[in-house]
Image (cartoon, helix red, strand yellow):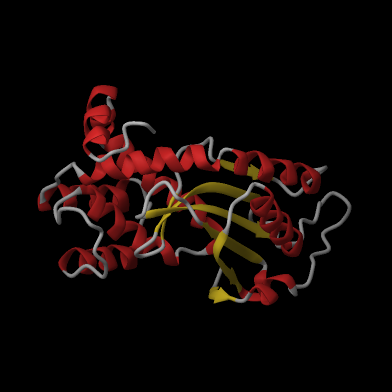
Amino acid sequence: MRRTGDVTKDYIVNAALPHHGDSYTVIPHADVINKVTRAITENGFKIERELYRCNTDAQIANGIYHVKSELDDEMGMMFAWVNSYNKMRKFRCAVGSYVTVCMNGMISGDLSTYGRKHTGDADVEYNQVIKDQLNQMSHYHKSLVRDKNMMKNIPVTKRKQAELLGRMYIEEGIITPTQLTTIKSEIEKPSYDYNAPEDSIWNLYNHVTHAVKETHPYKWIDTQRAVHNFFTAEYSSYMRPAFIDSVLEQHGYFEL
């Protein structure tokens, strides 16, 4: 699954369509792009940035759309998809957010993601799912903004950081050895200012999401979601309603 990295939209669109027989339903990359961009616009959103990545010959392609949000200066909304022509990956899409200073992605939970095998009426069904997810994008974005404000207020020692990263690598298999090295470098000398205390979970979270930005398109969505779920599960006790309300009120987000 060798990755070619960032590519142009034309490179994705012009990839040769697969021929796997009658049981395989082709979902062309070009159709996905057209449906997603049209649905985003029809929902009244503004696309600020389109990013495309793929492996060799675009057999597996990944599209990421950064969408303008007025809710929070530090975060925008995001829609992402991954599609394959080689039977190695279901069509998947997800709504989430991105951090504006670094373009790190945030995808949470199971409800914000969708996966469909290339069979039957997949080419019809996925279009409706895209519309349904975009209808909920603002809702998920609000939830992720809340998570950000929680994580900014949770301190974590260097020893605890080492424990969390070790578990993400050894127990959960979320990050790779190369990504672990990148995270260590980011802890020692951050590439970005995340507007949070140096020892906050928010900073560590972003060091991790910065490292996994280069994940193969095959598993980019799943990795982003796994990172978010790991951190929120680890610190779920801080997400209790009373604690949430007190912190959000301090930051002017009580009305969310």
Count all numbered tags in the image, as a single digit. 0
**Residue 255 screen position, x and y as percent:** 36, 31
Identify the image quadrant of the C terminus: top left
**Residue 138 screen position, x and y as percent:** 51, 41
Of residues 192 and 156, the one drawn nearer to the viewer in this rendering:
192
127 to 232, vertically: above or below: below
Of residues 12 and 34, the one drawn nearer to the viewer in this rendering:
34
**Residue 116 screen position, x and y as percent:** 68, 44
Residue at horizontal 54 percent and vertical 43 percent from the top: 137
- Asked where in the image residue 132 lies, by quadrant, the reply is top right
Residue at horizontal 18 percent and vertical 48 percent from the top: 163
**Residue 103 screen position, x and y as percent:** 41, 63
- Answer whether residue 202 is visible to the viewer in this image: yes
Question: Left or right: 42 with respect to 180?
Answer: right
- Answer whether residue 237 is visible to the viewer in this image: no
Identify the image quadrant of the N terminus: bottom right
108 to 51, vertically: above or below: above
Residue at horizontal 27 percent and vertical 35 percent from the top: 248
Q: Residue furthest top?
A: 242
Q: Residue furthest right?
A: 22
